[in-house]
Image (spheres, rainbow, N blue to C red):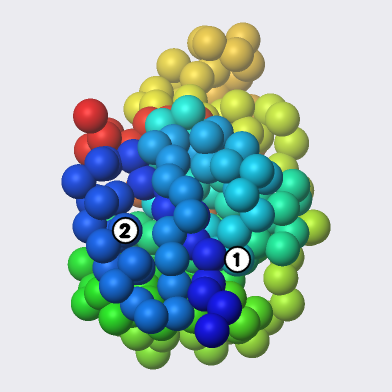
Amino acid sequence: MKKIRVLLAEDHEVVRQGLKLLIDRQPDMEVVGEAGDGRVAVERAKTLQPNVAVVDVSMPQMNGLAATKAIRESTPGTAVVALTRYDDEAYVQELLTAGALGYVLKQSPSAELVDAVRAAASGRRYLDRRLAARVAGDILSSRRRRDAPPAITDRESEVLRLMALGHSNKEIAELLFLSVKTIEVHKGNAMRKLGLAGRTDVVRYALLQGWLRDPQEP
């Protein structure tokens, strides 16, 4: 039986080794490579051409969202399963839009990841059961929007990034040499286009875009 070849991208070695033991224990899977950051994951995907790459969303050098996009572009034969502790719908949407076929929570039973790898290897989408009832309807039935991300301007992106870093409207206005009213307009337009409801959503979006480093990472 031909085994599913898996690449593991996870920056915490203890977690990565646990995942390796789990995958290698399956009769139809084998770990063919490991990566401790996003950039290495992309390079090893190119070299090893695995069937599936399990990618942690929060990684140094290149985060999971950027790594997923890069792997799908450079190694289209490799399916991506996103692995994360974040159960927010915004994360699911961003990762599936980037090209991930699976989305699994770290806090879920190990069977979730095994099922996701098998599904992705066969070209099927897989959403963690903890999330399925809440968000599957719209996300899994919609077409991928990978080639049509929300169009926000460079100025709007700059305002959101500064907002995510904790700056007030007044501080952003001073930094960009604009009026507070103009900043409010840019912020409002960007949040409307991206469907962001408040600062928490902005920070999450910034993390996924690689503008910020996950504060829980060492």
Could you say which is closer to the camera, residue 142 or residue 45? Answer: 45
Give the percent coordinates (x, y) of residue 109. 22, 77
Which residue is labeled 1 in the image?
A: 51
Total marks shown come to 2
Q: In the rendered image, which quarter is residue 122 located in?
A: bottom right
Q: Are marks 2 and 1 in contact (CB under 8 Å)?
A: no
What residue is at 26 percent from the left and 35 percent from the top? 217
Question: Hey, what amino acid is under mark 2?
Answer: Lys
**In the displayed structure, does residue 76 sit left or right of residue 210?**
right
Sequence-earlier tag: 2 or 1: 2
Give the percent coordinates (x, y) of residue 59. 40, 39
Q: Secondary structure at mark 2?
A: helix
What residue is at 57 percent from the left and 78 percent from the top? 2
What residue is at 35 percent from the left and 77 percent from the top? 26
Separation of marks 2 and 1 at Cα, in angstroms: 15 Å
> Which disc is residue 20 wearing?
2
176 over 132 or under it: above or below: above
Could you say which is closer to the camera, residue 39 or residue 136? Answer: 39
Q: Secondary structure at mark 1?
A: loop
Q: In the rendered image, which quarter is residue 107 located in?
A: bottom left
Question: Label 2: how many residues lie within 10 Å, few (<14), some (14-19) or many (20+)?
Answer: some
Q: Is any part of residue 56 visible from this angle?
A: yes
Could you say which is closer to the camera, residue 128 or residue 158? Answer: 128
Question: Label 1: how many residues lie within 10 Å, few (<14), some (14-19) or many (20+)?
Answer: many
Q: Is any part of residue 116 visible from this angle?
A: no
90 over 177 or under it: above or below: below
Question: Hey, what amino acid is under mark 1?
Answer: Asn
> Which disc is residue 186 wearing?
none
Give the percent coordinates (x, y) of residue 118. 49, 80
